[in-house]
Amino acid sequence: PAEQLSRIVQLLLKIFECAQGDITGEARAAKALSQVLKRLNKCPDLPPRGSPGRLAVPWRPIYACLLRVQLRGATLESFAAGEADQIVGSEAAKFHYQSLLALARRARNFFPEGAAEEILDELRPYFCPHDERHFFRAAALLSWFLPDTMRDPAAVLAELAGVWDLVSHGHEWNLIWWTVFSRMARHNPREVVPAIQPVLPRLFDALLRTLGVPTGKASPSRPDHTAWPGDLAWLLEGRSAKKDSVRKFCRLAVYTLGPESATWGHMTTLLAYAAPFFHPLNEGDHTSSLLQLLSLLCLNYAKRVGVEAGRHTVKKPWSGGSRLTREDSERMVDMMLPLTVTAFASKDSSTQFLTSQGIKDLASVCPEKVTPKVLEMLLPALENVMRPHEVVGAIMLTSTMASQLLRVEGGLDMIGQILRLTVAGVDLNDPGKTMYTFRMLMSILSQVPLMDPADLPHGSPKPEMLYTLQEWVVEIVDRVFGVLDNVPSLKKGFYMGSVLSATLGRFFDAFMAQMSPTLRSLAVQRVSRRVAQSLSPPAQKYIGSIVDSVVFASPQEALKLLLPALCDKVAPNGVLNSSESEAVYYTHILGHCLRRAGPHSAPYAARIQQVLDCVVAHEDKAYYKQGQKLLRKYLKGLVEVNLADNRSLAPSRWDANGVIIGDYSASCGVQQTPADCAVAFKIPTQDCLARARLVIDRYA
């Protein structure tokens, strides 16, 4: 509750004040305070600003502590007189200023009434461009301490915009002031948006210089040549000045949009000038900044639409003077979509990712304009084998747009076609495409249960894509094992190894969990056959993760098919296999088979014990190492607590046989709320604990 957190904050404030002079103590108290204030700011029962029950945090102790420790002086005058120097190269000092700046950021929402005016009065004497060191420092401190609410935001904005104009623009300088302006526009739109109109031309001109787009001049303006003092770098700790300044400007631009704002006109002019530089073959220092501008404008616009519609929660209520209309959204899409589609054709994967995110955000605000364009692009791009970069881009776009595609008519059947076409995306020669393919499949599987038509009730609607799922399941399993059987090495440093480590296990967990009984049985049989017939030591870890997922999804059937065969491979008739490589390999796979088997391994306890007797205490290091791993995984399977269900829909949507209840098409693309989720766990039984005790006693 907010009341309890407020009392904790008051206690920590006392500790912070008493720790004066102890750098480590102050830093620890400040870090704890920032974490508690972050939680307090999100409490639904937090009293509104101005109410008597709201917590008030004084700003002067935090400010004085920063000056005293980082500048070794109680005032800026002492630093100017040469009586203090910044602590350089000290980890304690670094931890101190990081904690204090984080505290200032979290505490400014709780500064008392009138704090903004007091902070401005404190720092205003140093806004003199003839003394850059004091000027830069005062501006940076203002960006950290100035609260979001003040008595006259319009007058403050006009004053600060004049201060911003006093210095030749650099990335760090713009970052400081655009951070302040964007916060003021977000939290005081009624007063700030009219006041910022005269400043907009200069802001967009500064953005164009920040982006670095060629202007045709012999000596173009380079804002990054305006150096930021090195001894003030700690005030911009952890920030990339150019990227973060573009990010803050995009937020500022979106939150100043309105019927009487000139932002629309300036934005249209800027994008018209920059449009030629979004060509997919274009390269240069400005390319990444332009892509960031494109994606962040779309993201912030979609977020503002969501906030105004009540779909997104924010720490402060939205009090905009005007709301974005349907016509505004259509105008935004008409302006941004051609640029994102053009840039999407790039061969660079990061460009494709950013533009696919932008297309997704545009589709969330105006789906009737964006989704048809996406449908036109996807299938031709996936089928175009002569342009592999388009295939990768289409896979990324499907991954981000899966939920929107499922909402359109015929979207489910189109997803079925995409599943068949992207089997070839699991490619040994292209680890990047393989990674994006697995991510796309996980995105689809998180919203589309895999049902065999034979499992659905008689007379229920059965989309066409269901009749292709059996073939697709066989194809994807064979494709994955084909890659694993032929991979030369998955040792450290091989990119395919890191791709499979990050995606393969999670994909098969989702893949097996979403299936109906008929499809799951088919997949289990296919995996069991490939595991028993193949021997691929370089990929044993990844094949083991597949076996782990299969056993977890269908323990009885998978253990029946796998466990006796694996035990016979390791120790036929209780005698260790004479082939060391084969015995070691299948011992490893057997461990994965038992890792989440739980009570279902009980019928095979005697056979498992025979294998353990052969390898656990073997004098050969290779046998011994895998035997110890097998023992650990066997014990984990007996005593560990695991999730009972990881399907995409609530348990109430499935019958006892694992088949969707009701209309199948209506169950696809469903976004669950936290209230619908039911988290259950598989708890070890008494029999499992007793067997684990016997195993420990036998091999201790």
Image (cartoon, grey):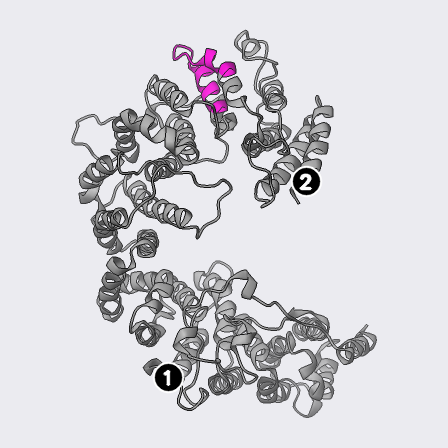
Where is mark 1, residue-wise? 461
Residues 594 and 319: in front is: 319
Between marks 2 and 1, how big is the CA–CA gap? 53 Å
15 displayed left or right of 164? right
The residue shown at (59%, 24%) is 59
Image coordinates for residue 256, horizontal then vertical, percent = 33, 36
Instruction: Name the image quarter holding residue 97.
Output: top right
Q: Secondary structure at mark 1?
A: loop
Residues 696 and 570: in front is: 696
Whether the magenta-drawn stretch holds residue 652 is answered as: no
Q: Of callouts 2 and 1, which one flags the residue occurring earlier in the amino acid sequence?
A: 2
Task: Please tell me whether the stretch drawn in magenta is mainly helix, strand or loop.
Answer: helix
Residues 650 and 288: in front is: 650
* Circle 1 residues within 10 Å: few <14, some 14–19, many ≥20: few
114 displayed left or right of 35? left
Q: Amino acid at mark 2?
A: Glu
Q: Eyeballing the image, is 623 above or below 316? A: below
Where is mark 2, residue-wise? 3
Image coordinates for residue 290, horizontal then vertical, percent = 28, 42
Q: Amino acid at mark 1?
A: Pro
Dot 2 and dot 1 residues touching (CB under 8 Å): no
Q: Eyeballing the image, is 421 above or below 72? A: below
Q: Eyeballing the image, is 554 above or below 650? A: below
The residue shown at (58%, 75%) is 548
Which stretch appears magenta? 121-142
Image coordinates for residue 27, horizontal then vertical, percent = 65, 31
The residue shown at (52%, 9%) is 80
> Seen from this angle, which residue lies furthest bottom?
573
